[in-house]
Each structure stands twice: as C-alpha cells, then as structure tokens.
Amino acid sequence: MRKIVIPCFALLCLLAGCSSGNKTNGGNESRPSAKPVAKQAEYETGRTAFQKLYVSARMWAADVKPFRLQSQFTADAPTNEGKSGLWRASFASPAKRMMKLFVWSGLVGPDAPQQGISFSAEDTWNPSNTSTEVFDPGFLKVDSASAYSAAQKHGGEKLTQKDPKQPVLFVLDWDASKSQLLWHVIYGSSQDEAKLRIAVDATSGEFVRVEK
C-alpha cells in the first residue's frame, strides 16, 4: 500500500500547485490595463524658457552666448501672460565660430514638436554680422509678461480690445546701435504681417519706441 499512497500523494500536491498557479495567472490577466495619461500643453514666459535652453546650450559649448530668442504663436497660448508653447533660441560659440538653434516645446498634437528641448545642426557664425551679434544673458532682467504689459499701454490695447484673439509674438535681440537688449512685442501671426511692433527695454522694462 505504501508504494501506491506515496505517488498518489505527490500527484495530488503537484495538481494542487498547478491549480493555484493557474488562478494566480488568471487573476493577473483579468486585471484591466492602465490607460496612458494624455499629455497636456505647457506654456512658458520667455525668460523661463530661455533659462532652460541656455542650460542645454552650455552643454554644447561652454563659451556659448545667445543672440536671439523668439516665440511661435499658437491659438491657445496665453499671450496676455507673455507665454508661448514654443520658444526658439539661437546661440553662438565664439571659440568654435559656430552657431546652433535650440527649441523648447510644450505643445501637444500630431503636428507639434515633441515636448522638451531639441536642437539643430551647427552652422557657421560670423562675429562681425550685426544680425547675429551675441549679448550677455545678464542683461535679460525683464520677462516677456512685463514687456507685453508695457506694449499694451502704447497701442497694443486698442488691438486686443478690438480682437481678443489677436496673435502676439515676442522676439528678444541685441540693438548694437544703442547697446541695448530689446523685447519686440509683435501684434500679428508673423513678423511680416505685423499690425504693430513695440520695443521694450529687456533690462529696465521701459518703453523704447513704436517700430510700426
């Protein structure tokens, strides 16, 4: 009888283990899979986006200096807060005599750039070209939100009252003739189609001039 009982007992244990394992696996398979969380669009002011881009640019070249920062208008962006979902910053390396474009994107959608920071290939930079003259980031003390407020007081408010969805762009660059860093608040979907351009000192926040 012992020769019969022992194998049967072992067989029962084996079957019990398999049954338990099947229940466990079946339990895991019956759990609903977690749905991916949809990404939300993000918007930043120019100075905040610039700081992120500057950190990335310094990884490319330690002596890097900026010469332009520009926003891209999208319909949902809170431009009245000086914010955009996409900022492009151009940097140059005097040691390399090269320049590079860095882009911060907070946009979502099938045609939107991937969220985060991306960059272009290097290109030749000429230090004598006034359109790409670099500036010290220390001059950037006033954010795009303050520049927008100043521009509103000098003609912009008339346009936004007439059209609450008025497109607005922000461009930051160095005015070599005045040795001055300027925010250009551009009322239009592009620089070529601007209804009004207001220059604001990016260091003091003071109104400089109406450019158009």
Image (spheres, rainbow, N blue to C red):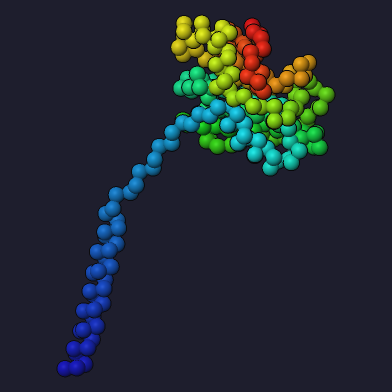
Residue at image point 76% right, 20% down: 179
In the rendered view, would you say 2 is above or below 124?
below
- Which quadrant would residue 137 be assigned to in this image? top right
- The image position of residue 158, as x and y in percent, is 51, 5
Horizontal placement of 50 versus 122: left or right?
left
In the rendered view, would you say 124 is above or below 144?
below
- The image position of residue 146, as x and y in percent, is 57, 20
Q: Is residue 190 visible?
A: no
Seen from the viewer's position, the closer of residues 104 and 28 is: 104
- The image position of residue 169, as x and y in percent, is 57, 18
Seen from the viewer's position, the closer of residues 149 and 17 is: 149
- Which quadrant would residue 59 be assigned to in this image? top right
Residue at image point 69% right, 40% down: 58
Residue at image point 67% right, 12% down: 208
Seen from the viewer's position, the closer of residues 47 and 110 is: 47
- The image position of residue 186, as x and y in percent, is 59, 14
Outermost residue on the right side: it is: 128
- Which quadrant would residue 142 be assigned to in this image? top right
Residue at image point 65% right, 29% down: 89
Outermost residue on the left side: it is: 1
Give the quadrant of the N terminus. bottom left
